[in-house]
Image: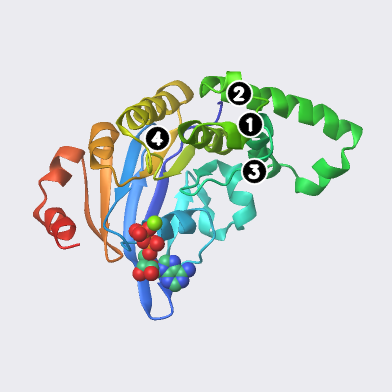
Amino acid sequence: VGRDVQPLEVDGITVRFGGIVALDDVSFTVRPGTIHALIGPNGAGKSTCFNAITGIYRLASGTIRLGDTDLTRTAAHKIPALGIGRAFQNLALVGTSSVLDNAMLGRYALTKGGFVQYAVRAPWTMRQERRHQQRAAEICDFLGLSAHLHKPAAALSYGDQKRVDIARALNVEPTVLLLDEPAAGMNASETAEMAELIHQIRDELGISILLVEHDMGLVMGIADRVTVLDFGRRIADDVPAAVQRDPEVIRAYLGS
Ligand code: ADP
Ligand code: MG
């Protein structure tokens, strides 16, 4: 994918909503080329953390850096172009549009004129669009979607629709890919395929993964490192084997 590998450093971040402290001085580092899981009971602050990284929420304090770039000083719409891709928990696809067009949606985030330039379709834009189409088709091929390129996204199985959303996220050529519950609603064999795909994205594209996921089998099976949140606080940050036997982690999960 041709970007330098850079660590994503979340450094002492606090996010408040009125009186609620959704994240309280949370730190962790997604090291280059790793699969890093972010787990915790409902309401622990996982989605808030994703929204902080992608610039949607403002921080009360702390910093988030990708390599030397301070993301907390970057407008949300410029963050994808810096190398942060995000797939959503609730699919953000246009069901009536083709798989290829959906995969290309990620590109709008990178175009200077944004969607308007695409809609106007100047000649140079058409050339650019063909290049982008080719690139999106390659990514779809990588994700095993090549037989479906011209079908409406809504015609695909749930598992394949998740892949289209990941294709869209990969289109920004990220150094770090944020995945919010990629296995939610999947059966055991679909979950195993998703695990395989996450490995492939890391191993073959060299992209680091930050993964929020409730399926503990999936998390403990594929993560190199696990950060655990509870009530907005970081209660553990270690390799899976150590996290699984951490008394505070066990207490947080049993208590919820
Ligand atoms: P998780 O994704 O781990 O389930 P969230 O990050 O969604 O947890 O939520 C963390 C806490 O912040 C919860 O108490 C939640 O109610 C609160 N919260 C999240 N987003 C908002 C918001 N936009 N406005 C107010 N409170 C919010
Ligand atoms: Mg959430």
Give the structural element (helix, strand or loop) at label 4.
loop
Q: What x and y, as percent, mark residue 184?
A: 38, 43
User: How far is disc 2 from disc 1 in space, using C-alphas?
Assistant: 7 Å
Residue at the spot of label 4 = 32
Query: Which residue appears at 50% of the width and 31% of the height?
Result: 160
Question: Is 205 on the left or on the right of 112, as rendered?
Answer: left
Which numbered disc, 4 or 2, marks the residue that appears first in the sequence? Answer: 4
Q: What x and y, as percent, mark residue 178?
A: 45, 43
Q: Amino acid at mark 4?
A: Pro
Residue at the spot of label 1 = 99
User: How far is disc 3 from disc 1 in space, using C-alphas?
Assistant: 9 Å
**Residue depth check, mark 3 versus mark 4: number of the one nearer the observer:** 3
**Quarter holding residue 200:** top left
Q: Amino acid at mark 3?
A: Val
Give the structural element (helix, strand or loop) at label 2.
helix
**Quarter holding residue 23:** bottom left
Pick the quarter of the image with the C terminus: bottom left
The circle on residue 148 is 2
Give the structural element (helix, strand or loop) at label 1.
helix
Residue at the spot of label 3 = 94
Residue neighbourhood size for the residue with mark 4, other residues' Cα within 10 Å, grouped as few (<14), some (14–19), many (≥20):
many
Q: Amino acid at mark 1?
A: Val
Mark 4 in CB contact with mark 1 (< 8 angstroms)? no
Cβ(mark 4) to ligand 1 < 8 Å? no
Which numbered disc, 2 or 1, marks the residue that appears first in the sequence? Answer: 1
